[in-house]
Image (cartoon, rainbow, N blue to C red):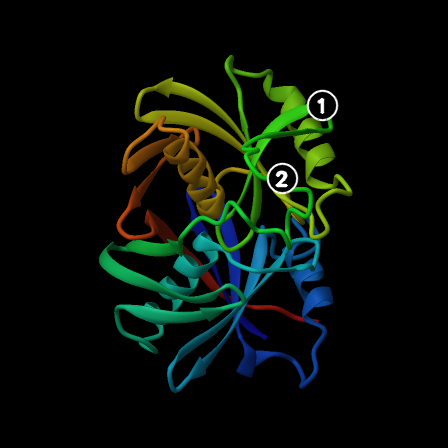
Amino acid sequence: MIFYKTSSFGNDFIEIDENDLPAPGTDKRLLAREICARHHGVGADGVVFYRLRDDGIQFQIHNRDGGEAELSGHGMAGLAAVLHERRLASSPLLLHTRSGPRQVTWLGRDGPVFQLQVEIGTADFDDQRSFPFLQEKHESYVMAGLEFYPVSVGNPHAVVLCPEEPAAETLPVLGEELAHDLHFPFGVNVEFVHFSSADSCRVFFYERGVGPTLASSTGSAAVFAVLRRLGRVQDSLSIDCGADRIAVSWKQGIFIHNFTRLICRGEYFQ
């Protein structure tokens, strides 16, 4: 089975054309778990399964644990890079996701690195399906001992604002506890945010179905949406992910300025 692998700010994905699946009816959940395994598979944070349609591209994303997610900005960026490499689509690219249509625009290329603009969409602070505990006039809630702001940007997030930079070794444990809290019927992605300046912050990402990740575009969008609602930022934000910075902006919706590296094309044996 032919696959491609990409990485956006260290958040890596495998892209598979559904026409290349081993057989009709292939169990995508099982395949995602096996191929994403770091030591026994190819290794990745998730798998994008895609199919060309007359009106765009069908986009389906599975996390490392096999569970299907609603949306992934870096997954969409990785797919856009692959489709550009395969000359199968033009810009802007229309992707049909579980959260609705999203656009990815190619901005340039430098060798294996693609520069892209990725549409995340608008923020929903009233998503009762993902957050059945929501109450009127409440912005933040406390669960698992953490105060957080719930927001959906195509998928559910709990944004934790940290007045002081937290101890790095505690974040994976805290993130896992909140991500699996039973108050979230579909689980939740968690972001720990510490401001470093008026328009920049450092974020630790804990992704549902994956665990700690080096970056997350929907996580970055969720952080931006919460901070913008609270009046902490205006229409742009720079997020420090360590070695990289993610630029988030508002243009009648939330957009990510993305850099994606096309890593390899390979063949996976089952």
Q: Residues within 10 Å of mark 2 (few under 14, many from 20)?
A: few
Amino acid bearing label 1: Gly
Residue at x-position 66% and y-position 25%: 146
Please identify the quadrant where the N terminus is shown: bottom right
Residue at x-position 31% and y-position 21%: 198
Q: Judge depth for marks 1 and 2 and give the one in front.
A: 2
Under tag 2, what secondary structure?
loop
42 lies above or below 247 = below
Viewer-side residue, 161 vs 132: 132
Amino acid bearing label 2: Gln
Residue at x-position 40% and y-position 25%: 201
Q: Is residue 23 visible?
A: yes
264 lies above or below 22 = above
Residue at x-position 40% and y-position 54%: 120
Task: Please provide percent x and percent y for residue 5.
Answer: 48, 59
Under tag 1, what secondary structure?
loop
Q: Which residue is mark 1?
A: 145
Quadrant of res 25: bottom right
163 lies above or below 181 = above
Task: Please provide percent x and percent y for residue 134.
Answer: 63, 42
